[in-house]
Each structure stands twice: as C-alpha cells, then as structure tokens.
Amino acid sequence: AILQALDVSLGIVEEIRAQLFPRSAPQSGETLQTVVIVGGNFAGLAALWKLLAAGNFQIVLIDQRIYSEYSPGILRLFCEPRLYADLAQPLPSSRRNFTCLQGKVTSLDKDKKIMTYVQGSSSKTLAYDYVILATGSTYTAPISPLQQEMTLKGRQQGWNKAHDRLRKATKVIVMGGGAVGVELAAEIIDHYDKAKQVTLLDAQSSLVPNFPPSVGAYAQKWLESRGVQVRLGQLLSKWTETSCTLQDGTVLEADIVYVCFGNRPNSEMVVSTKSCSLTQRKNIQVQ
C-alpha cells in the first residue's frame, strides 16, 4: 500500500511537471502556480521533494500534525514507546516558495480551485492551481493520533499511555487478521512472550488474505507456536474496549481489545465536496 501510494503520488507529480516546466528557474516577477499537498507522510513528502527540486512552484504542505511518522514500524511502540524518537520527525520548515501549514482540510472546490481547512478554531480558505491528496488511510487510535497528539510531545505521551495500558494487561484480543492485526499480535507476543494471552480473530478463513496463501499459513503457524490463539471464520456481533461478542453469542473477555480492521482511504474532504460527481467520488474512495 505504501509503494502504491508513492507510485500514485510521483505519477501525479510527473504529470504536473510535464505541464508546467521546462525546468528553467522562474524569471524575476513571475507568478508561480501553487501546488497544495494535503498530507505530510510518505507520499506527501515524496511529492514535496520532487517539486522543490523542480524549483518553479509555490508549494503548500498541509497536515493536521506537525510531524511525520515511519508508519511501517509504528506498531513496535505498543511495546517500546522509547523508540518513538527514531520513528518520527518534524515536518519541513517553511522557506522560499514553500509553506508548511498545520490544519485539517474539510472540502475542495475543484471548479473554483479553492480548499477549506480548519486551523485551530478558525476556518480558512486556500487557493490552488493543483492539489495532491496524500492523506493515507484511517485507523483507530492509538495507531492514528488523537486530536491532542498533533505535536511530537503529545504523540509521545499518547504512545506512553498505550504502552502502559498494554503492560498492565494479561488478556489481549486483536480483531482483524490482516497485515496490521497480524503484526500487532506478533509484536506483543514477541516482546512479552507468555506473559500475555493473545487471541487473534478474523472472519476470513486465513490470515493476511491479500497476500499469497503461503504467507498466511506461515503467519498462523508462527503465532500459534508462540501461544497465540488464532480464531478464523469468526463473525463479530459487537465489541467494546474489553470484550467482543461473536455472532453465535460467545463472549470473549479481555483487558484490551484492539480493532485492526475497517481502515479506508482518508478522503472525506473529497466525498463531501458537492462539485465532485458520484463517479468521481467512487473512484477517489477506491484509490
């Protein structure tokens, strides 16, 4: 998914480049076209560095947070939050022809080429010529930061709390046998060994179904050999922070329940845009 996001983002950048350059430096007094990048992690930063190297754009990067995270390693922080400093860094500082804004984009008007974003308690507008959406996917907390965790200090404190809750737990349920759920279960059992009773649930008949079958089989064998109870083909009826109920009425209790499914493209600001047709909305959600 990360590589696909990078490919899409860089492909858009190359399309913009083909339309807007030759690579010649801007002439004195020339009005630069504005490219707004929404999202400051892998895809957004890759696009930023490409456009900065081109040198003839006014670039605006906007994100709710003032930092970027190395998301492939972020699940390790449930067990070792001290590593957060190695997995995060501040977003680039504003400079000539580049502005970094902290805010949440709420809507886009593709006809007027204006976006609306919230900064603090204020709603503002920003005009653009081109926009690159690099907002990634939605996840539940603490994988995704809470509103009070938009600074590096706040995010570190959030991971400390998540770790402390896991450290005190004896029984853990991980709902979702995709890549995130399998990795989280593996991180917990590898770090705590037999000190935690981990149950991994999924409605599918195999783990990580988007990978080759051999991957799912290996993951299940590895987890079960370390004491993880893998329950596949289990349909859920409801769940809370400390329990989940299967459709057959079975109730499983735990100290913590982690929800590792239901993530989707983080494109609400586009879906809510009136000037975006239904077909365009569906295409955006699929991407």
Image (tube, helix red, strand yellow):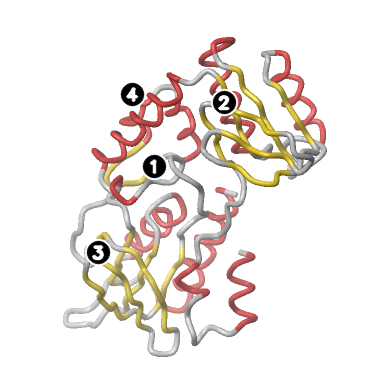
Q: How many labels does the image show?
A: 4
- Do callouts 4 and 3 mark residues in contact (Cβ within 8 Å)? no
Residue contact at pointers 1 and 2, CB within 8 angstroms = no
* Residue in the picture at 41% in, 78% down: 108
Left or right relative to 228: residue 36: left
Q: In this view, does 232 lie above or below 67?
A: above
Give the residue drawn at x 54%, y 64%.
Answer: 11
Tell me the CA gap for discs 3 and 1: 21 Å
The residue pinned by badge 3 equals 98
Look at discs 3 and 2 and give the one toward the viewer. Answer: 2
Between the residue at mark 4 and the residue at mark 3, the CA separation in whole angstroms equals 32 Å
Report the residue marked by disc 1.
69
Which amino acid lies under the numbered mark 4 shown in the image of this protein?
Arg
Look at the picture and state if 76 lies above or below 59: above
Distance from Cα at disc 1 to Cα at disc 2: 25 Å
Crowding near the residue tagged with mark 1, few <14, some 14–19, many ≥20 C-alpha atoms within 10 Å: some
